[in-house]
């Protein structure tokens, strides 16, 4: 099944490339920890997956990558916390005692680090805005044991919602220097697709770089071979697509010229490729009606509407 149909693909957009460059510099500079806040649906989780799948291109065997996620609970103890981390890493715990689960987590980190040239692990922690003082202290204890006993270095990359950006100042003001020093040495704000530079560049990726299978036709060629042969490209539809998105924003009372969420963008493009582009006749471009129907049918601006509501006083 084509990635457009499954929705499981990652576009190497400008924001993603910025993330890759910054993260690679963190790894090479021996940073202990950093924050990556960003708006909802801008592609942070996809960026983690992309880096985890491709890090050897930039770092070879210098490090290993582990990915985990913080699960929110009304109350959370050590056993639940360490169990959640293990499950989100793909290692469901077979022990119930908190100390056993902690030992399993440390074992996974040490095992990964031992297989890297620099004896180093990058730990992605998604939904990190749910961390609190107690959970940070648990992570510090893990970090210290892995470092002291096994000489494995850890770079903690905490990824989450925009309120994560306030963590460094909040914890520093509270005198929590150990937490700030371990996890918040630097901050990179993951941004959405800038209007229109990133938007236009992302469209061209479907015409030029995205291929399935590897080395096969581009995504655009796959869905519109006759159109492409006649000179058609998705990038050439950029002005129309942008104009109709702005029209839809205006109708919904959303800011004109604002960045677009990555999820909204891909939902719209996936729909066009599957349901509109294959039916186009050679020599015919997309119409305003085509795009308007796709915007309405996919509800691709819902994420911008949600953000507008969250940001309203």
Image (spheres, helix red, strand yellow):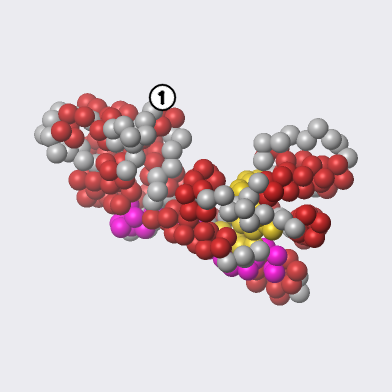
Circle 1 sits on which residue?
1
Q: From the viewer's perspective, is 79 left or right of 308? A: right
Residue 93 lies within the magenta run: no
Kindly identify the residue that appears in the image at 13 percent across and 30 percent down. Answer: 282
Can residue 306 be seen by looking at this rendering?
Answer: no
Work out which residue is located at the far front of the displayed protein and give it. Answer: 117
x and y, in percent, of residue 2 in the image: 38, 28
Q: From the viewer's perspective, is 197 left or right of 99? A: left
Taking depth in this image into account, of 206 and 272 the one nearest to the observer is: 206
x and y, in percent, of residue 58 in the image: 48, 53
Q: Residues within 10 Å of mark 1 (few under 14, many from 20)?
A: few
State which quarter of the image contains the N terminus: top left
Taking depth in this image into account, of 106 and 298 the one nearest to the observer is: 106
Above or below residue 50? Residue 8 is above
Q: Quadrant of residue 85?
A: top right
Kindly identify the residue that appears in the image at 81 percent across and 56 percent down. Answer: 149
Q: Which residues are magenta?
A: 180-199
x and y, in percent, of residue 180 in the image: 69, 68
Above or below residue 273? Residue 133 is below
Tell me the SS state at disc 1: loop
Q: Quadrant of residue 142?
A: bottom right
């Amino acid at each position: 099944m084509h990635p457009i149909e499954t929705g499981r693909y990652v576009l190497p957009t400008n924001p993603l490339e910025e993330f890759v460059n910054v993260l690679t510099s963190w790894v090479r500079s021996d940073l202990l920890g950093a924050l990556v806040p960003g708006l909802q649906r801008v592609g942070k989780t996809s960026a983690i997956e992309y880096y985890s799948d491709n890090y050897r291109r930039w770092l070879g065997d210098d490090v290993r990558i582990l990915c985990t996620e913080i699960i929110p609970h009304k109350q959370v103890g050590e056993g639940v916390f360490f169990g959640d981390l293990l499950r989100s890493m793909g290692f469901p715990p077979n022990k119930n005692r908190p100390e056993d689960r902690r030992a399993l987590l440390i074992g996974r980190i040490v095992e990964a680090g031992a297989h890297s040239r620099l004896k180093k692990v990058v730990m992605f922690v998604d939904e990190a805005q749910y961390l609190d003082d107690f959970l940070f202290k648990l992570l510090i204890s893990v970090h210290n044991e892995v470092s002291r006993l096994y000489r494995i270095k850890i770079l903690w990359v905490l990824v989450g919602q925009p309120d994560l950006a306030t963590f460094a100042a909040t914890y520093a003001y509270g005198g929590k220097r150990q937490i700030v020093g371990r996890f918040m040495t630097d901050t990179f704000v993951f941004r959405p697709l800038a209007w229109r530079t990133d938007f236009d560049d992302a469209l061209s990726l479907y015409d030029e770089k995205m291929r399935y299978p590897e080395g096969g036709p581009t995504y655009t060629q796959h869905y519109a071979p006759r159109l492409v042969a006649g000179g058609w490209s998705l990038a050439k539809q950029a002005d129309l697509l942008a104009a109709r998105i702005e029209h839809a924003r205006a109708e919904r009372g959303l800011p004109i010229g604002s960045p677009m969420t990555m999820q909204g963008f891909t939902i719209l493009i996936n729909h066009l490729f599957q349901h509109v582009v294959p039916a186009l006749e050679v020599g015919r471009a997309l119409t305003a009606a085509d795009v308007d129907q796709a915007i309405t049918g996919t509800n691709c601006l819902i994420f911008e509407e949600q953000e507008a509501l969250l940001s309203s006083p």
